[in-house]
Amino acid sequence: AQTVTQSQPEMSVQEAETVTLSCTYDTSESDYYLFWYKQPPSRQMILVIRQEAYKQQNATENRFSVNFQKAAKSFSLKISDSQLGDAAMYFCAYRTSQGGSEKLVFGKGTKLTVNP
Amino acid sequence: EADIYQTPRYLVIGTGKKITLECSQTMGHDKMYWYQQDPGMELHLIHYSYGVNSTEKGDLSSESTVSRIRTEHFPLTLESARPSHTSQYLCASSVVGVADTQYFGPGTRLTVL
């Protein structure tokens, strides 16, 4: 069974600085998808970024980028120019590419605090 | 944010009551999901549906039941609520496509006294 590990329960960053959140996963599959979701306090969980395992190029979305190391099974999220609105729980998630299996496997999350 | 809605947002109820948590989406997504999330913890899939009249149990055993009579509607029911059911319940939906990205509703925070 696949597992997702986020080793940093909490992180903090100064506004305008850069922070990297770690995520590792365990799988025997070669093709899969990885996600970072953001859950602000008492607000909706939203997708931050998505990576297809067959793509070597790291995904980027504005200030958010990932460092995808397939051999190491690592999928870290880098937030550049951190803003107060980035404060949230961040969840790393894995999804198999096999048809018929819709399960997202989540890590336990990292609470990010942004200091002004 | 995606067009997926959950009601109520907060519910405090006594033991033994029957409750239904509502989830609806206006995006025409075929696939819908229910996750359970304890405070500060990861999400666990409890139910999912591929379409109308299709429901499956997820990884986390749950005493709740679901139904999918309409594409846009995926309610979750607890016949007899217990304190152990206290948690946050998140509904999500996805469309067949790249990675079947799931979009989440705002959640229902349930407290059973």
Image: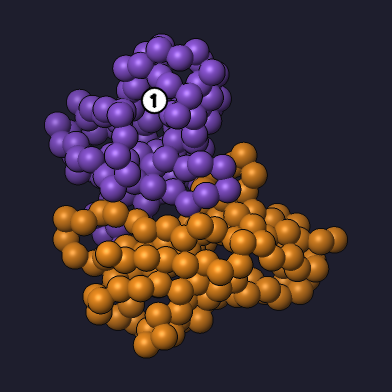
A111 sits to left or right of B34: right
Quadrant location of the C terminus of chain A in the rendered image: bottom right
Quadrant location of the N terminus of chain A in the rendered image: bottom left
Number of numbered discs overlaid on the protein picture: 1
**Label 1 environment density (alpha carbons within 10 Å; few <14, some 14–19, many ≥20):** some
The amino acid pointed to by label 1 is Glu
A49 sits to left or right of B21: right
Q: Residue at x 35, y 16 (%)?
A: B80
Label 1 marks a residue whose chain is B
Q: How is the image coloured?
A: by chain
Q: Residue at x 64, y 54 (%)?
A: A88
The image position of residue B76, as x and y in percent, is: 33, 27
The image position of residue A74, as x and y in percent, is: 45, 79
Which corner quadrant of the image does residue A17 belong to?
bottom right
A10 sits to left or right of B113: right
Asked if one can make out residue B2 in the rendered structure from this viewpoint, the answer is yes
Name the secondary structure under disc 1: strand
Q: Residue at x 40, y 72 (%)?
A: A25
The image position of residue B57, as x and y in percent, is: 23, 40
Outermost residue on the right side: it is A116
| Image position of B76 with respect to A116: above or below | above
Mark 1 = which residue?
A: B22
A62 sits to left or right of B80: right
Q: Residue at x 15, y 36 (%)?
A: B54
Colour representing chain B: purple
| Image position of A70 with respect to A96: above or below | below
The image position of residue B65, as x and y in percent, is: 27, 27
Asked if one can make out residue B32 in the rendered structure from this viewpoint, the answer is no
Colour representing chain A: orange
